[in-house]
Image (cartoon, rainbow, N blue to C red):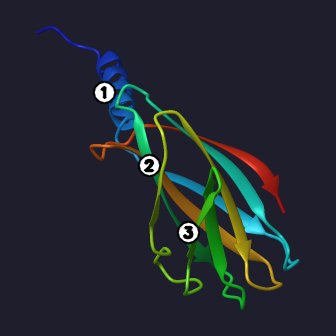
Amino acid sequence: MKKISLKPVLAMVSLLAVLGQANVAVAHDQSGSLGNANSAIDQYQVHCFDDGSGANDHLEVAVKDLAPKATPKVSLQVIRDDTATNTTDAVDGDASYSPEVSVKGSADQYYLMTVDKTAAGAENYLIEYHCITGDNQHTGTDIFSLTNQ
């Protein structure tokens, strides 16, 4: 009877599991926190581009106001050219995001996202964002932090 070592088999299974997970997640999340000052903002630049899935058509975003539960409400603005689109999480600390907003763009588009709050008090948040093609496929997405207050 010939014995086969399980070490190479286990290594291959592990590698395949890792590679198989690489393309499963298509959601993009960005967490952050705003300091105590009522004027605190965080700003991000999102770049949507064709990564082989198709040209960008629009950016979809929503924000979730995380614990601690505090008086300020967290809002997110997406700015493209001369237009700003806003969404606000109305309930602090629940499991729901703000209403999702969609901002039209071009094939290779940069968007500015600003997170702010309505009053003084530290706040934590989570942004979910997706660059989407005209046929509703997820496409190339990069994010860069510009301001962190």
According to the picture, the residue beneath numbered tag 2 turns out to be 58
Q: Residue 75 vs residue 87: left or right? A: right
Residue at 73% across / 47% down in the picture? 145
Looking at the image, do the residues carrying marks 2 and 3 touch, with CB atoms under 8 Å apart? no
Q: Earlier in the sequence, mark 2 or mark 3?
A: 2
Q: Residue 24 vs residue 39: left or right? A: left
Q: What kind of residue is marked 1?
A: Val
Q: Horizontal and vertical percent for residue 71?
A: 72, 91
Q: Residues within 10 Å of mark 1 (few under 14, many from 20)?
A: few
Q: Residue 63, labelled with which disc?
A: 3
Residue 121 is drawn in which quadrant? Answer: bottom right
Q: CA distance from mark 2 to mark 3?
A: 17 Å
Q: Earlier in the sequence, mark 1 or mark 2?
A: 1
Badge 3 marks a residue whose secondary structure is strand
According to the picture, the residue beneath numbered tag 1 turns out to be 13
Q: Residue 136, labelled with which disc?
A: none
Residue 95 in the image: above or below residue 146: below
Q: Quadrant of the C terminus?
A: bottom right
Looking at the image, do the residues carrying marks 1 and 2 touch, with CB atoms under 8 Å apart? no
* Residue 131 is at least partly visible in this image: no
Q: Quadrant of the N terminus?
A: top left
Badge 2 marks a residue whose secondary structure is strand
Please state which of the two labelled residues, at mark 1 or mark 3, is closer to the viewer: 3
| 55 or 18, nearer to the observer | 55
| 50 or 79, nearer to the observer | 79
Q: What kind of residue is marked 2?
A: His
Badge 1 marks a residue whose secondary structure is helix
Residue 11 in the image: above or below residue 121: above
Q: Residues within 10 Å of mark 2 (few under 14, many from 20)?
A: many
Residue at 20% across / 12% down in the picture? 3
